[in-house]
Structure formats: structure tokens, C-alpha cells
Image (spheres, rainbow, N blue to C red):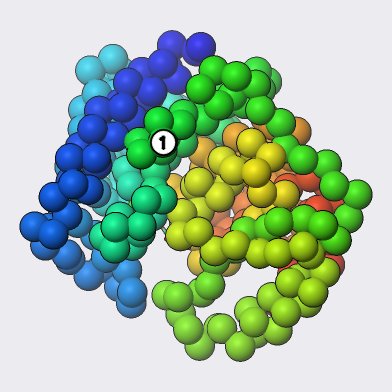
Amino acid sequence: MHPMLNIAVRAARVAGTIIMRGYETRDELTLEQKGAHDFVTQIDKDAEQAIIEKIQQSYPDHAFIGEESGTTGENEYTWIIDPLDGTTNFIKGIPHFCVSIALLHKGRLEQALVFDPLRSELFTAGRGTGAQLNGYRIRGTQPKDLSNTVLATAFPFKDKSTFPAYNQTFCKIFAASGDVRRSGSAALDLAYVAAGRYDGYYERGIKPWDVAAGELLVRESGGIVTDFKGNNDPLNKGEIVAGSPKVIRGLVSHLKNL
Ligand code: IPD
Ligand code: CA
Ligand code: CA
């Protein structure tokens, strides 16, 4: 494993311990509202702080973009961190959330991990070295079309005025596919695409920390990642489609006009 990814794994495990402790005592947590239907807990903040401190012990000059603390420093190496992806699940006691950490070098995704502390599942990827789950190679699926796929998506809960348009497209995608899930963790959705558990995923309204690690995981597992029009480099576009080339083609044919 690349030394920088190794440090990120250690940082994710520290965050995982904080998250699990918080999960067991979540009734005592105070919630802070960041926006419409968007909450943060002290656990999100503590986990992010712990990740940054752990990485800084080895790489004091690196820069960080964290969901909770914003941008710290400037460097050709920049870590993108979502300390707890699936906060609503965490708060409600739904056992589906994770830590997501990605490393950019000169703007290019180099290393990535998604860690599910409840299931002890660690998804890792390095550019050009494939994707792994707990050290074993993973590959995405290669369906011939959408017909028997199990897809994942997310409802636009932060801006419900966009729901009617989203729903029109959803109806078409649902009709064309086998079934569709909404899990509440974009980072895990992408890790599951990389692991072949979901055949594809799409969402609008995401931030770089939701999807940076998942993007590299999907690419290194043989899939591709685009925006709703099928263009590359979705990280800063606020929307993402992931899956095999044929799944992307099927999804983008519906999503391109949304
Ligand atoms: C959210 C989750 C959710 C997705 C949202 C994200 P958070 O992240 O990934 O599944 O639909 O777009 O904001 O707030 O739990 O870190
Ligand atoms: Ca997130
Ligand atoms: Ca988060």
C-alpha cells in the first residue's frame, strides 16, 4: 500500500473509533443545523479533527479540504475529507455511514479510501493500482444494459423544489432498471459500485468530499464516473453518475436533459 494511503487508513480507523463511540451514545448528542434538512454533530467535527491531526503528524505541509473545517493550507498534495458520510443515518440509528478520505496531487486523484466502521469494511484505491476491499481486489459489474441492474440514487432533499423534475427522470430510470436504492451515504454508494454490489449510482447536489474517494474507487474497479451529460471530471460539478460504460450510457440518456 502506498505510504500516504497507509497513513490515511490509520486516520480513518481513529475516526471510526470516535464514530462508533458516538453512535453508542448518540441520544446525548446535540444537533446543529447547517442548512435545510442538513445536520452536523460534534462527532462529525471530532472525527474530522482527528483525521487531520493524524495526517499532519506525517505530512505537516499538506493541505486539507474538510467538510466541517473548510480549506486549510495550500500544497500540491491536498486531502479531501468527509469524516462522517451519512450523518442523517448516524443520527437516526440507521447502521449505514462511513469515513471518506481522498488525496489529490496537483489536482489529480491519487489515493482514496472509504471506511465503514460498523462492518469493518475498508475500500481502498490507488491510481493505477486497482481497488480493494479489506485488501482483496474488487471489480465493478459489466451489465449489457440497465434492464437487470440494481442502482442507487439520492433524492434532492436539500432543495425539494427540484423534486418534480428529478422524479420524472427517476420514473424513466426505474422503469428501465431492475430496482433502485436510496441508502443515505453517497461515499458508500460509490464504494458499493466499485465492489459490484450496485451496478450504478447517480446524484445531483453533491460536494467534492461526498464523492472524491468514491470516484477513484469506481475508476480503479473498471468503471467510469461522469456528470449528468456524460462528461469527465465531475468532482466540482455537483452531480455524478457512476458505473460501467454501458450503465453510464443508459443513465446519461435519461439524465442529460435534467
Ligand atoms: C450526504 C450523504 C447523502 C447524500 C447527500 C450528502 P453527509 O452527506 O452522502 O447520501 O444524498 O448529498 O450530503 O451530509 O451525510 O455527509
Ligand atoms: Ca457527505
Ligand atoms: Ca459528512
Identity of the residue drawn at 71% across and 64% down? 179
- Left/right placement of residue 124 relative to residue 199 reads left
Q: Which residue is mark 1?
A: 119
Q: Is 188 situated above or below 103?
A: below
Toward the right, the furthest residue is 144
Q: Position of residue 47 (x, y in %)?
A: 23, 40
Q: Position of residue 121 (x, y in %)?
A: 46, 31
- Left/right placement of residue 236 relative to residue 244 reads left
Question: Identity of the amino acid at label 1?
Answer: Arg
Task: Name the foreground residue: 14 vs 179.
Answer: 179
Quarter location, residue 78: top left
Identity of the residue drawn at 77% across and 55% down? 149
Quarter location, residue 237: bottom right
Task: Name the foreground residue: 90 vs 8.
Answer: 90
- Left/right placement of residue 20 relative to residue 76 reads left
| Residue 82 appears in the rendering | no
Number of numbered discs on residues: 1
Q: Position of residue 77 (x, y in %)?
A: 43, 27
Identity of the residue drawn at 83% across and 42% down? 142
Using a 10 Å C-alpha cutoff, classify the residue at mark 1 as few (fewer than 14 neighbours), some (14 to 19) or many (20 or more).
few
- Left/right placement of residue 183 relative to residue 35 reads right
Q: Position of residue 99 (x, y in %)?
A: 37, 40
Identity of the residue drawn at 77% across and 40% down? 141
| Residue 201 appears in the rendering | yes
Q: Quadrant of ligand 1?
A: bottom left
Quadrant in the picture for the C terminus = bottom right
The answer to whether the residue bearing label 1 lies less than 8 angstroms from the nearest atom of ligand 1 is: no
Q: Is 146 situated above or below 223?
A: below
